[in-house]
Image (cartoon, grey):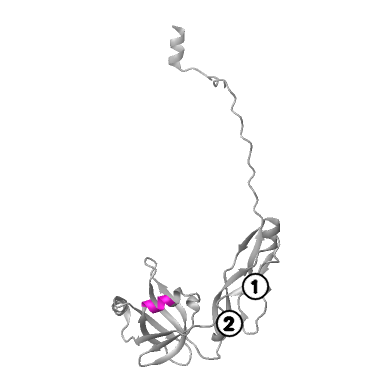
Amino acid sequence: MAERKEITVRAEQRAGRGKNDARRLRSRGMVPLTVYGGEGEPVSAAAQLRELAAILRSDTGHNTIFTLDVEGVGAHQVLFLDRQIDPLHGRLMHADLRRLVRGQKVEITVPLHLVGEPAGVRDESGVLEQIVREIEISCRPDDIPDAIDVDVSSLGVHDVLHVSDIPADENIEILTSPETVIATVGVVREEEVLPAVPVEEGLVEPEVIGKGKKEEEESEK
């Protein structure tokens, strides 16, 4: 796990509620926030969009631990709990943050990274398919990994890797079901190509089944 960078975001308390208040904050480049959990009551606040967006764009994304310093309340370490994104512009509209307590475990979702080239891909022309790209874990905030690496180099064709195959870590409890399939190596079957039917020269015109009334009359003249 890479060394964590210390990040502090300064925020102001938010007294107003409702859409009008949120609209005024966004016009100032701010994002409405609500801080939950830990040892304290929920806190309504607002922070600069550019600072929160930079955290979400970082390598650790929504799993980034940072300090939120709310004016008149104090500073606490937090994590993103939930966030509302404008589907049209991709802008962060609102965020719920989780207040962290040292030594207290949190439940969080982390990415799964497949490491190595499967034997079935290297030697048997198989194709690696990743079914699950993240799992839910429980651990102390300081032990949250950026991602969990899973070695797939031993997988042959038709082999399946399950969550239960992830090596144990005494600092992390995996909450996702052990039977969940992470990845498998399959075979790409080529579609059978039928030979083209050659076109014969001098094809005979199709036989006329019957003549129309007008054609019969003309033929009798």
Q: Which residues are magenta?
A: 49-54
Provide the secondary structure element on which disc 2 rests.
Answer: strand
Give residue 116's position: percent from left, percent from top: 65, 67
Give residue 80's position: percent from left, percent from top: 46, 80
Provide the secondary structure element on which disc 1 rests.
Answer: helix
Tell me where residue 16 sits by quadrant: bottom left
Determine crowd level at label 1: few under 14, some 14-19, many 20+ residues with C-alpha closer than 10 A: some
For disc 1, the marked residue is 163
Circle number at residue 138:
2
- The amino acid sitting under disc 2 is Ser
Answer whether residue 76 is visible to the viewer in this image. Answer: yes
Give residue 46's position: percent from left, percent from top: 35, 83
The answer to whether the residue labelled 1 contacts the one labelled 2, judged by CB atoms less than 8 Å apart, is no
Residue at the far top in the pictured view: 221
| Relative to 188, residue 216 above or below | above
Answer whether residue 158 is visible to the viewer in this image. Answer: no
- Quadrant where the N terminus is found in the figure: bottom right
Is 45 contained in the magenta span?
no
For the residue pair 31 and 115, the one nearer the viewer reads as 115
Q: Residue at 38%, 86% (x, y): give it.
A: 10
- Quadrant where the C terminus is found in the figure: top left
Q: Residue at 46%, 8% (x, y): give it.
A: 220
Q: Residue at 55%, 20% (x, y): give it.
A: 207
- In the shown orientation, is residue 167 left or right of residue 26? right
